[in-house]
Image (cartoon, rainbow, N blue to C red):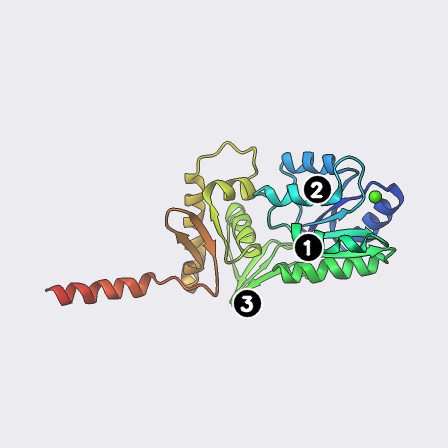
Amino acid sequence: MSVTVMLIEDEADIREMLSLSLMRSGFEVIEAETAEQCLERIEQNVLPDVMIIDWMLPGISGIELVRRVRRDPLTKETPIIMLTARGEEVDKLKSFEVGVDDYVTKPFSPRELNARIKALMRRTGAASDGKLRAGDIELDYVAHRLLIRDELVHIGPTEFKLLEWLMRHPDRVYEREQLLDRVWGRTALLDERTVDVHVLRLRKVLAPYELDALVQTVRGVGYRFSVSHKQKKKKKKKKAVVDEIATV
Ligand code: CA
């Protein structure tokens, strides 16, 4: 699985040129001519890692598309780069307000856009070398390998997908339903307990390295992956024991 870029641009020449350049840089590219097409793809559960949205689009405008993308829980966090033409500068502020992460002013070189995407992916947690890292965990999502402290670890395909999703979106809490949508796909008719089962399996994979606590249960909400956010379960237990002793 490589980094998928969705490119929404109505001008065929620019779209083709960018698409080619992005593919040469190792990105997987999904093209859309209009905002409507883009929304349709998202509806079909085609979820890119990054979106490049042209400001001037026929029908639904680029900025309106950003608003809608941000409203959808499935794409709310997807990094967005806006393409603007010279003279549209005044609207930059507006675009940041609605949730654009970066923008590139036309004309620009494909190389510049590639660099911006890579910078954005680094900022949002996906390294450009095809590897995700968190503490002692290294997930190679191109070779589909999990390394913990440089040791190759066996992991099932679903657990891999789940871990990849969580590592790409650390420190955020996801409901079971959201994880079903994003990891298993929106069309999957699966019970929310499926998520619990695979979270349990994932913890078992991480447990021998004492890293299972990175996949955290947020009671009444869902799950979170976090290296920085330590769960205070153990502490609480200790305190409970202390309380017990105190009441004896
Ligand atoms: Ca355009």
Residue indicated by mark 1: 96
Q: Which mark is residue 5?
A: none
CB atoms at circles 2 and 3 under 8 Å apart?
no
Disc 1 residue type (three-letter):
Phe
Other-residue count near label 2 (Cα within 10 Å), few / some / many at <14 / 14–19 / ≥20: some
Determine the secondary structure under disc 2: helix
Whether label 1 touches label 2, CB < 8 Å: no
Return the residue at label 3: 150
Q: Nearer the viewer, residue 130 or 14?
A: 14
* Residue 23 position within the rendered picture, expressed as x and y whole percent measured from the top left: 79, 51
Q: Earlier in the sequence, mark 1 or mark 3?
A: 1
Identify the residue at horizontal 19%, vertical 64% (top origin).
243
Q: Secondary structure at mark 1?
A: helix
Please tell me whether mark 1 or mark 3 is closer to you in this view. 1
Q: Quadrant of ligand 1?
A: top right
> How far is the residue under mark 1 from the one under mark 3?
40 Å
Q: Quadrant of residue 40?
A: top right
Q: Residues within 10 Å of mark 3 (few under 14, many from 20)?
A: few
Q: Nearer the viewer, mark 2 or mark 3?
A: 2
Q: Which residue is mark 2?
A: 64
Front in this rendered view, residue 8 or 198: 8
Secondary structure found at label 3? loop
Mark 1 and mark 2 lie on one chain; the one further toward the N terminus is: 2
Amino acid at pointer 2:
Glu
Could one spot residue 42 in this view of the protein?
A: yes
* Three-letter code for the amino acid on which mark 3 is drawn: Asp
Horizontal side of residue 207 vs 238, given as left or right: right
